[in-house]
Amino acid sequence: MSVLKNEYNDLLKRFYKATDYLNDKSIPLAERKRWLPEFQKIILRMNEILGELKKQGREPSNKEIMEGL
């Protein structure tokens, strides 16, 4: 598996953990908001990787994008 795919899969795990954290109403909103910039970095890098894969001729399916490459 390529380095990009491994990185994407690692980021996808972080993405799902982050969404769980950010949606957890038991955590004060101010604390959750503090992590939004990091969440945005995760999403940005995931999108960059998908763009690179497309440039290489690899078009991931929606299932792969959501469940891992």
Image (cartoon, rainbow, N blue to C red):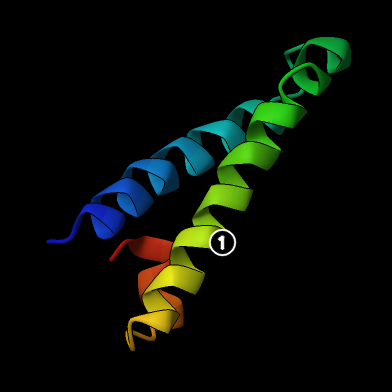
Residue occupying the point 62% across, 51% down:
44
Residue occupying the point 17% across, 60% down:
2
Residue occupying the point 43% across, 81% down:
54
Q: Find residue 1 and report its horizontal and vertical position in percent.
A: 12, 61
Query: Is 57 situated left or right of 39 in this image?
Result: left
- Which residue matches tag 1? 47
Q: Residue furthest right?
A: 30
How many dots with numbers? 1
Please say if 69 is above or below 14: below
Residue type beneath disc 1: Asn
Query: Is 13 situated left or right of 36 in this image?
Result: left
Q: Find residue 4 and report its horizontal and vertical position in percent.
A: 30, 57
Is the C terminus in the top left, top right, bottom left or bottom right quadrant? Answer: bottom left
Please say if 4 is above or below 34: below
Please say if 49 is above or below 43: below
Q: Find residue 6 and report its horizontal and vertical position in percent.
A: 24, 50
Residue occupying the point 42% across, 48% down:
12
- Local crowd at mark 1 within 10 Å, few (<14), some, or many (≥20)? some
Q: Nearer the viewer, residue 27 or 66?
A: 66
Q: Find residue 40 and report its horizontal and vertical position in percent.
A: 69, 40
Query: Is 17 situated left or right of 38 in this image?
Result: left
